[in-house]
Amino acid sequence: MTADPLLVLLVDDYPDNRDIYVQFLTYSGLRVEEAENGHQALDKAFELHPDVIVMDLSLPGLDGWEATRRLKNDPRTRDIPVIALTGHALAGHSKGALDAGCDAFITKPCLPERLLDEIRAIHGTARARSGDPTT
Amino acid sequence: MAPARTTTARGAKPRLTTGATTRLEVLEALLMSRDAGQCAQRALTWLQRYAGVRRGLCLAADSAPPRLVPVASLGVSAPRLERYSVDLEVRDHPLTQALLSSTPTILGSNGHGATTPLGPGPVQAIALAPLSPRDLPAGLLLVSPFSPQGAAEVRWLARVLGPRLAALMAAQRVEEAENRLQRERGLLYGIINAVIDPILLTDGDGRIIIANSRAETLLAADEDQSEGRRQAVTLNNMLFSAALTRHAIEGAEAPRHEMPLVDPVDGSDLLFELMSTPATDVREGAGIVSILRNVTDLQRATAEIEENYRKLRQTEADARAERDRLDLVIDSVADPILVTDPGGNIVMMNAPAERLFVAVDGDSEEARRQVQANDAHFSSFVSNLFFEGDSRRRTGSIGLVDPITGASLPMEAISGKIVSEHGEVTAVVTILHDRTEELERARLYEDLKKLSAELEQKVRDATAELVRQNELLRRSHIALEQASALKSQFLANMSHEFRTPLNAILGYTSMLLKGVSGEMTPQQRRNLERIDSNSHHLLSIINDILDISRIEAGKMPLTLVEFLLPDMVREVLAEVEPLIARAKLAVATELDDALPPVKSDRQKVKQIIINLLTNALKFTPQGWVKVTAAYDTRLDRLTIAVTDSGIGISPKDQEVIFEDFRQADDSPTRQYTGAGLGLAICRRLTQMLGGELTVRSALGEGSTFTLTMPRTPQD
């Protein structure tokens, strides 16, 4: 373990779901920041530059697809991996999410351990891709 | 003869004075006289003056015819003189006798008064001395009265007057003859010139002696006439001479001698026929009379006649050819054609008409009667046309009968009048057209039309019904589609809406079980595990609903991998171990480890097996469950069968159980829980994998569900 634990930006409009993942990820030793809509997600992403963003797609106002598209179109946030999380299990949703620039796609319900595994996996891939020696 | 004029006496001499002077005077007067009348009158006047004659008459003897004619008179009225023209052949006439008497004769004194031309009283008649002694007396001088002293003067005058009178009479006769001759000659020339044919008399050398004006025009030219005309005349003379010569050689036997000449006036060619006749005159010698007849027009007319004849022949030939063609045409027409004259008699008909209107030998009595009937019908039709006056055409119907077959022939007749230039109807041409077929066709057509209309109506009705049904179908289809789309949408939405709270439930439960919130008592943990289990069950139901929605929406992708069925069955048994433990049933397997690997969607095959196994556990209150995996080499298909000793399924329910949300017991009070989606999903998945899912069961005797699938997916 290195000095700075991973910073995860968790975007979900459903408070209980945010709470579960915040509790569990914090319990698991990660730092977690929350956003409850698309605009907040963009603001925090630009401000905090998290290591991984977990994005619920169905958000009020600016939705998760659009927020992801903007993040991936911005040079400051382009390299941050985004894990899409949705209750919509139809095939079209995952395709749309990947088109928007999401790096992974998880269907709810998603147990906290599973999310943690996914974050660790995607962060490792992203770091390997960017050539960061820290693990 | 003109009345004698009184000559004025030259000197007034005393009356009755005679002598040599007066005699010389009268002799001179007589000699100077122009004609017999003047001469005689002068003699009478002298006698009146010198012989005391008051009345006198001088008659001259004419020789041809021989008669006495009065030439001069004195004191006699003219009408009376007329009586004294005396025929000398009548010898017993007193004047004739007086003429022939050598001595003076006294008339009227012896009962001859009636014949005395000089009125009452005796008249002395003295014959006038002739020119020569052999001739008859020159005339007769009648005088009254005469004095004895005048008698000598009378006798003397009779002697000197006679020869003079005779000479004058002769001269007069010659002159008359000449005049007559001149007149006759003029007349003759007039006649000759009046003849339009040139007439010529030529001498033996061909020189023209006499020519009429027409001949002169052709054959004579004056110096002052034009050069062309003179040349033409010269040419004509040569031609004429040549013709005459030829005529002379050939003789009069040659039928015609044609001679071309040139018209000197206009230069046109003329053709003459030459008729020459030799004429012999005692004084003039042999000559030839030629008559030229202008046959130029004749020739032209002949040529024209020949041309006309030729044309006529040609026209005739054309007409005959035309007629032949016409006959051919008319006979080739299948419709009867008849030509009728104004009397209503048929003058011509073609073969089809003959069949109807002519009876031939061997025809039956009936056929003959039909021919007559046909003829009567036709005649009536045509005669109407004659009566109709102005209309040149008539169309109508005639009912005829075929004399041979007896078939009725409804004919359409079209008659046309043929009218001459003068507006007379010369013939009527009639064409008959058999309308049997036409009528039959029309009838069939009507039938057809009716049937067609009926059919059309039926089709229209059926179409309308179809349209109506279609519309209903379309509407219900739209409604169904809408309902289906709504249902899918609803299910998708609901599954999402379910998942979000369920995610929280599962999440919290999982965290608690992981000890995130600290340690729990065993009781708390067991309860939490129940919550977790039920939450998962709810999630599986939601997933089933979502699967149905995905399959129906065609959004269920296949992920093909190769795997071994026995491995998968063991995995399933491990997963449902809790259920098996709870059901307290014996679960057996028959797995052939030599099964070939299968290439399919592992997840979906597993889902089907789990479903079948959980159903078997659920509907088997007691007994056993068996899972069998086998390979049919013949069909190259793999089968997995789940058999139980459970409640079984009635035959009528064996299809129902594969429908959505259905269980064999659908009643609200049913014994078994479940959404009733399991088998519906299984069958759909099986179909996606190219396999089939069947059931064999009987109520109370358990069931066997068999999944049959190909080793590799089919197209």
Image (tube, coloured by chain):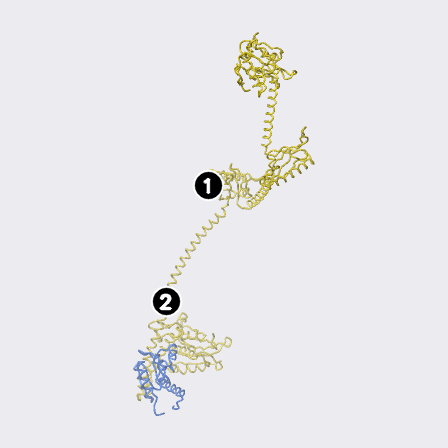
Chain colours: A blue, B yellow
Image coordinates of residue B373 in percent, x first then y, are 51, 39
Query: Which residue sits furthest left?
Result: A15
User: Can you see residue B621?
Assistant: no
Q: Quadrant of residue B45?
A: top right
> Residue at label 2?
B478
Image coordinates of residue B689 in percent, x first then y, are 44, 76
Residue type pointed to by label 1: Ser
Query: Which residue sits furthest top?
Result: B110
Q: Is residue B104 left or right of residue B607?
A: right
Q: Is residue A66 left or right of residue B300?
A: left
Q: Which mark is residue B391?
A: 1
Most foreground residue, B290 or B72: B72
Image coordinates of residue B404 in percent, x first then y, are 55, 42
Q: Chain of mark 2?
A: B
* Label 2 element class: helix
Q: How many angstroms separate mark 2 from mark 1 (CA)?
A: 73 Å
Q: Quadrant of residue B315?
A: top right
